[in-house]
Amino acid sequence: MRLPRKSSITSRAEFARVKTTGQAKAGRFVILSTLADTTLDSLRTGFITTKRSGKMAHERNLLRRRFRALVQQHAPEFPEMRRYLVTIARPGAAQATFAELEADWLRQARRLGLLTRPETKL
């Protein structure tokens, strides 16, 4: 699943709405926020990477690419696609490996009820 431009959260008002009325769960590397909205056609995603999460621009760009890959890989498993989904990078996320980011992102998605598949331990 590729993320088309129309599935991005672009306005400040949409981010604010998810923050004020949605649910959020914080992990070690990410904060995942979501808000169900039946008026949407499909999943709308947004990523927030501040200088606190990565000092250099290339670190923040890498985080956004990794978050995009996580959504592309795991969003088709969501039982309900009509929702907003915001991923916020926490300090230290730029130093985490992709596997660590994925594990933390999936843990928060399960806590929010976005994924129903049980977590597998390797």
Image: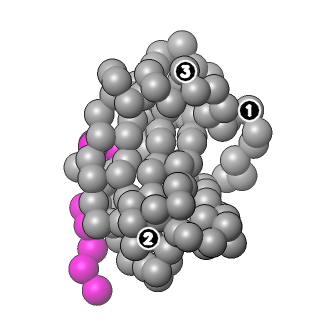
Q: Nearer the viewer, mark 1 or mark 3?
A: 3
Does the magenta segment cover residue 116?
Answer: yes
Q: Nearer the viewer, residue 97 or 53?
A: 53
- At label 2, the amino acid type is Ala
Give the prevailing secondary structure in the magenta stretch. loop
Count of numbered labels shown in the rendering: 3
Q: Secondary structure at mark 2?
A: helix
| C-alpha gap between disc 2 and disc 1 | 27 Å
Q: In the rendered view, would you say 82 is above or below 57?
A: above
Residue 5 falls in which quadrant of the image?
top right
Write the residue at 38% across / 40% down.
Answer: 33
Asked whether the beta carbons under mark 1 and mark 3 sit within 8 Å of each other, the answer is no
Write the residue at 42% across / 28% down.
Answer: 18
Q: Residues within 10 Å of mark 3 (few under 14, many from 20)?
A: few
Q: Nearer the viewer, residue 63 or 116?
A: 63
Q: Is residue 92 left or right of residue 98?
A: left
Write the residue at 61% across / 60% down.
Answer: 64
Residue that sits furthest to the top in the current view: 39
Q: Which residue is mark 3?
A: 13
- At label 1, the amino acid type is Lys
